[in-house]
Structures are given as C-alpha cells and as structure tokens.
Amino acid sequence: METVKITNLSKKFRRYHQKSSNIKYAVLNLFKGFGSSRHEDFYALKHINLSVQQGETVGIIGENGSGKSTLLKLIARILFPDEGTIETKGKIATLIELGAGFHDELSGRENIYVNASLLGFKKKEIDDKIDEIIEFSGLKHFIDNPIKTYSSGMYLRLGFSIAINVNPDILLIDEILAVGDENFQKKCFERIEEFKDKGKTILIVSHDLNVIERMCDRVILIDNGQQFSKQDPVEAISEYHKRLFQKRKQALRLGPDKTAVETSGEMRTLTATQFNRWGSREAEITSVKFFDDQGNETYDFRTRDHLKIRMDYHAKKLIKKPVFGIAVYTEDGVLLTGPNTRTGDCDIDVIQGQGSVEYVMESVPFLPASYLFTVSIYDHSLRHAYDHLEKCLVFNVVESRKVKDKFGTLHIPAQWRHVKKGKPEPR
C-alpha cells in the first residue's frame, strides 16, 4: 500500500538580488520602478515523482540547497507545492526543524501537548503516552521548566521523543539527529529500527551516508532540484559522490611551459606555482593519467578496483638513476602512502628524451573520498628534485559492494575468526 505518492511536484521560491538598506531606499526604488526587478523565481524542486510503500525507509541525499528539506516540508504540509500533488495516508510526525511547533514560554510538558496536538493526536492519546515521552527524552528533571531554558540538545531530545512515541504512520527526519549526543543518537536509531519493524514508513534526509546506506531500503538523489532515482542505496551514494567529484579538479595535463587542470570536462589554465611545483626541470613530468583494468582513462574508482597510473616524462639530457615517486593524501592533507621506484625495486639506469613510468595498484585500498595526488622525479639520493608537483591531481573513490567495512580511510583485506578451545572453527 502506498503511504506517500508524489506526482509531478514542483516548488518555486523567489531569489532576491538586492536588499534595501532602509525604508528611504525602499521607497525610492519603488518609485524608480526597481521593485519588480530585484528578484526572480527559481525552482527549488522540479517535476518530482516518488511513490513510497508502507514499511519502506527511503533516504533522500544531495548537496546543501538541492531541495531535500523542501521536499520533506512539502510532504509534511509545512509548505505547499506550486505544481503537482502529494497524497499521504496516515498520521505524519516530523523532525525537520529544531524546536518547530514549540513555544518558548511554555514548559516542556505543556509543549508535549501542543506539539502532539499539531501532529493530529487527541488529548487522551497524549495522556497515555506522556510518561513514555518524558522517560525517553531523559528530561524528567527539566520537563516543567520553560523550554526557552533548554539547550539545542534538549530541544532535540524532546522533539524526537514526541515524534517517535506518538506512534505516527509516517516519520520524516531531516538531519536533526546530528545535534544529539552519542548516547542519545544510539537510543534514537534503536527506536527507529523498532519503528521499521512495526511496518512504519520513514523518509530521512542526512549527510551521514553510512546511516543512509545502513538504514534505507531505497535512496533518492536530488541535485539542483531535480530527481535522479537510484533505487539501490550503494548506487545512489556512488552517483552522488561522482557528481560531487565532477565539480572538483578531475585530471591533470602538463606541458613544458604551463600546467592545466581539467574540471568537469573543461580545460582551465593555471600557473604551475599554484600546485607548488619545484625542481631543476632537467627532467619534467609531461602528463599523468589514471586507467582502470580495461585500459579506460578515468578518475573515479571503487575500493578494491585495479588502478594504473602512467606518468609521461621528458628528460632534456641524459640522467642517471632517476627516482620516480608518488604520494597520496586525504583532502585534509594527511599522507597515506608515498612509494617510489627506488624503494619499490624498480631501478631505472638512465632516462633521456621521452618515456613513461607506470605504477599499478592491483586493489585500491582507499575508502570512498577524494584524494590528492603528488608526482615527482628525483635523483638517486632523493635530495635533488628534477620535477616535483605537490598535490597536483585529484582522484576519487566511490562506494563498492565488495566492501562492507566503511569506517576510516583504508580498506585492509583481512578475515575474522572465532577461536574456541584453542582451535579455529571450520569456515
């Protein structure tokens, strides 16, 4: 049975270009005829179609400003669409804005009645649940204080306790759980799992993609107000990462006199100093390319994929025993690895003119993220730099079905074993 059905939904807002600094300028602008030109309409959401079945948990992901929260507010009837329709079946509870529906001058107890009433519940129903709501919130000693004295975490506790304990048919959650402390978050997720087990419908917006992947049956990606339906959570999150990464520096092309970065398919000239490039330049790196196991050039990989890096060079004179190296960093600048041909037992006697050096990862060890890449050519002592380009390239790792452990930065191939009475159990 469908509990939420959205058909051809669109929502417009006004975008203002200029604000009047005071009443005087507002009046002058009005007489000058500027009033109608200071804003334009834009679509926060455009032609959204979504059907959610009873008992489903659906995640909604996308960048800030993509329209995710607007969609939940439309479903909750906090906002109303300009086009299209929304049909829902059953009572809806929302955790969309911290303190929404609360009155600062009222106590926590009084706000329970007000908030639950706004959700469509009768006083008798609230009477039956109020002790459970207060107990879950952990605010027993503060429940009769005005909530204007509450911290943001206490607001969250009270709001979530009301929403989850009044037994709605549909629960809408918008990133709000990020406010709570660790213990309360754990408590909330446990209750949400109970909620799922009862066959309730949940729509959740979150930037915590581990939560989205773990909790959701389906995931909808929204980008610039448009819907990109990727039903499978792993595929949807992977597509989301790809779209994010495409907006960053994607590939490097080097020439003898300039450095260029390819961003979203367009070449944009940058000075070499922007990449902290140094060295005598007796030998130069002229190109760096990444390839998958099919030989296709790409800068998007999955954990445990095959990855080949090819560095083309031009040596202007004969150079003995050069050392080629790479380094991989997190976006925060943490060095993850820094191999080179000398430590890797790939001795190169001499280089002169043009050539290439390849570095192959049989299994990419990095978990989903963007990574910064350094390339270099040094002499055999590793003290003299011929060419060094620091953090000059970005490559990306997206979700993989092969990998279940997604905490941290690295994937370490390993096995768990339960040892009983000194003997490993048969696998």
Image: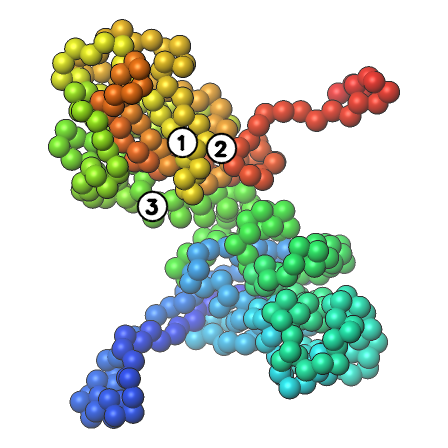
Q: Quadrant of residue 3?
A: bottom right
Secondary structure under tag 1 reads strand
- Which residue is more in the foreground, 313 or 230? 313
Residue designated by label 3: 248
Question: How many residues crowd mark 3 within 10 Å: few (<14), some (14–19), many (20+)?
Answer: some
Residue 217: % across, % down:
62, 50
Residue 54 visible to the viewer: no
Mark 1 or mark 3, earlier in chain? 3
Verify CB contact (< 8 Å) between mark 1 and mark 2.
Answer: yes
- Which residue is more in the foreground, 22 or 125? 22
Question: How many residues crowd mark 2 within 10 Å: few (<14), some (14–19), many (20+)?
Answer: many
Amino acid residing under circle 1: Val
- Which residue is more in the foreground, 292 or 184? 184
CA distance for labels 1 and 3: 17 Å
Answer left or right for 185 relative to 43.
Answer: right
Verify CB contact (< 8 Å) between mark 1 and mark 3.
Answer: no
Residue designated by label 1: 328
Mark 1 or mark 2, earlier in chain? 1
Q: Which mark is residue 366?
A: 2
Amino acid residing under circle 2: Phe
The residue lying at 56 percent from left, 75 percent from top is 77
Amino acid residing under circle 3: Arg
- Which residue is more in the foreground, 105 or 88? 105
Answer left or right for 206 relative to 247.
Answer: right
The residue lying at 50 percent from left, 47 percent from top is 236
Q: Quadrant of residue 205?
A: bottom right
Answer left or right for 65 relative to 275.
Answer: right
